[in-house]
Image (spheres, rainbow, N blue to C red):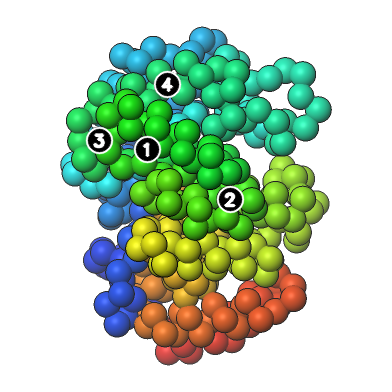
Amino acid sequence: ERAAALAGDTDPGATRDGHKVQLLANIGTPADAVRAVEAHAEGVGLFRTEVLFLDAAEAPTAEAQATTYQQAVEALGGRKLVVRTIDAGADKPLAFATQPDEDNPALGVRGFRLTRILPELIDTQLAALGAVTDDSMWAMAPMIATPAEARDFAARARAAGIGTVGVMVEVPSAALRAEAILREVDFVSLGTNDLAQYTMATDRLRGELADLLDPWQPAVLELVRSTAQAGRRLGKPVGVCGESASDPLMALVLVGLGITSLSMSPGALAAVRYAVRSHTRAECEEIAMAALAQDEAAAARSAALSKVNPDA
Ligand code: PEP
Ligand code: MG
């Protein structure tokens, strides 16, 4: 009957005591947006636009991009859509944007840093996004490391006519200075895949280091907590759009740490919705504190599990 309960639960995200947590989907194409709606997502928390250009030899025009973004907006029918500007480099090479001569591409000219060498690539994309006249569309930059970068992105996005502007927090420096970054933008979203990679100095593509890359590492949870607290102080949304949001137990921890939205692969929505709706906010906080008090990732996961409501 648990499966039936999962299949039937399509309500918006909220804890058992009614504290709202937006449950969103990660997508890479407008077709994925259709699947997100079918999975009862409340919107899209991460549109990975570089996925559109993986096979492209040349940078796409503003007109072609605007058509694609408009399709995603229409598929979502007024639901929230967070579009991330092109995150090329490292694990996401694009023929027209990746630096061929980098020894350490994960630490190189990737994400928002592309504005240093190819500013027109990002500005063209922002112009295409600005042409989509829908207030449900938010723009977000990847790989922001400093408040100055957040300010620069916000200025470029607002100049393009985009109303709601945010950045990803996926570099430890951004998490450590989250309040200063949040003063520059309307929202942030934690990318726990890269945040774990950079916090733990562990290549996200090296499977044999998965224990270090684990988002349950208490150091990573600590950065999530301090970022969420900065958002609470400033009254601005702090989401998570890394894979960790797809894990129902981790979702409870993230809610307990003060995260306001969770964005995940559409297939994970039902199980995460069920977990969040089965616990109060206070229970989530207790689960999160139990995890944070540990020294190791495995211990953090076990501590969270042992606090979970056995009746849930
Ligand atoms: C992340 O880094 O957690 C993230 C959501 O972005 P990506 O996986 O595309 O780098
Ligand atoms: Mg990332």
Q: Residue 73, labelled with which disc?
A: 3
User: Residue at the location (42% across, 85% down)?
Assistant: 282
- Is 145 in front, or is 290? 145
Rendered position, 228 above or below 300: above
If you read the primary sequence from the N terminus, does the residue marked by circle 4 or circle 2 appear first? Answer: 4
Q: Write down the residue under mark 1.
A: 139
CA gap between label 4 and label 2 equals 22 Å
Q: Rate crowding at label 3 as few (under 14), some (14 to 19) or many (20 or more) other CA atoms within 10 Å.
A: many
Q: Which residue is mark 2?
A: 174
Q: Which mark is residue 123?
A: 4
Figure quadrant of residue 239: bottom left
Q: Residue 122 placed where, x, y %?
A: 46, 23
Does 265 appear above or below 129?
A: below
First in sequence: mark 1 vs mark 2: 1
In the displayed orientation, state which residue is furthest to the top.
58
**Number of other residues with Cα within 10 Å of mark 2, as a class: few under 14, some 14 to 19, many 20 or more:** many
